[in-house]
Amino acid sequence: TIFTSMFMHGGWMHLIGNMLYLWIFADNIEDDLGTLNFVIFYFVSGVGAAMSQVLMDTNSQIPMIGASGAIGGVLGAYLINYPNAKVLVLIPFGFFSQLIKIRALYVLGFWFILQFINSALSSSSGGGVAYAAHIGGFISGIILILFFNRRAQKNIKKKNNTKSRSNKGPWEQ
């Protein structure tokens, strides 16, 4: 099913890569949304990612696995909520490498552009990476987080209004 495919991976590196992205980006989004809303957000992003892949190749008989599309949704949400956050990135220079802090806007923008480039350069006939799912998940995450943020702001306003009406302490009647 679409949901069970989000927990399957094509190998250890696929799993490790996805866990790395979750470790870096997902905790902030979960803090913003709360655990239950984050789980809902994650699954809906995954469905959006899967539907994007299906729309790109409706005749495909190749099964799609992996959580990368749902994680793409988390990346899209992070881009909206934390565009100026600094992300520690390992930049390889041949035998040497450098750790550099780069704004999330540039890191995630570069990742998104790479998905388009890799999609254009790959063939869909033999399977491989579902780049359309990555792109669809990212776009789904951007759209979804706007709705979740709006909903969260309404809840905050509602809590503030009820608190301002009852400013009495427990000792006051």
Image (tube, rainbow, N blue to C red):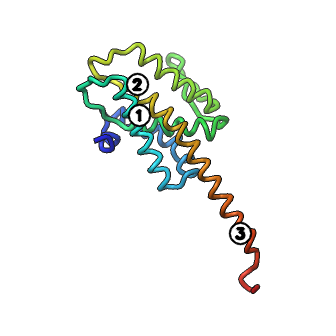
First in sequence: mark 2 vs mark 1 = 1
First in sequence: mark 3 vs mark 1 = 1
Q: Which residue is mark 1?
A: 49
Within 10 Å of disc 3 (Cα), the crowding (few <14, some 14-19, many 20+) is few
Separation of disc 2 and disc 1 at Cα? 9 Å
Query: Which quarter of the rendered picture does the N terminus lie within?
Result: top left
Q: Which residue is mark 3?
A: 163
- Which residue is rendered at x = 67% and y = 35% of the image? 84
Q: For residue 81, which quarter of the picture?
A: top right
Instruction: Return the residue nearer the eye: 88 or 30.
Output: 30
Give the vertical position of 158 relative to 49 (above or below). Answer: below
Q: For residue 52, which quarter of the picture?
A: top left
Find residue 134 and report its horizontal and vertical position in percent: 43, 30
Tell me the kind of residue under disc 3: Lys
First in sequence: mark 3 vs mark 2 = 2
Query: Of tags 3 and 2, which is closer to the observer?
Result: 3
Within 10 Å of disc 1 (Cα), the crowding (few <14, some 14-19, many 20+) is many
Q: Are marks 3 and 2 in contact (CB under 8 Å)?
A: no
Q: Which residue is mark 2?
A: 131
Q: Is residue 12 left or right of residue 152?
A: left
Within 10 Å of disc 2 (Cα), the crowding (few <14, some 14-19, many 20+) is many
Tell me the kind of residue under disc 2: Tyr
Find residue 116 and report its horizontal and vertical position in percent: 47, 19
Kindly state the secondary structure of the residue where label 3 is placed: helix
Kindly state the secondary structure of the residue where label 2 is placed: helix
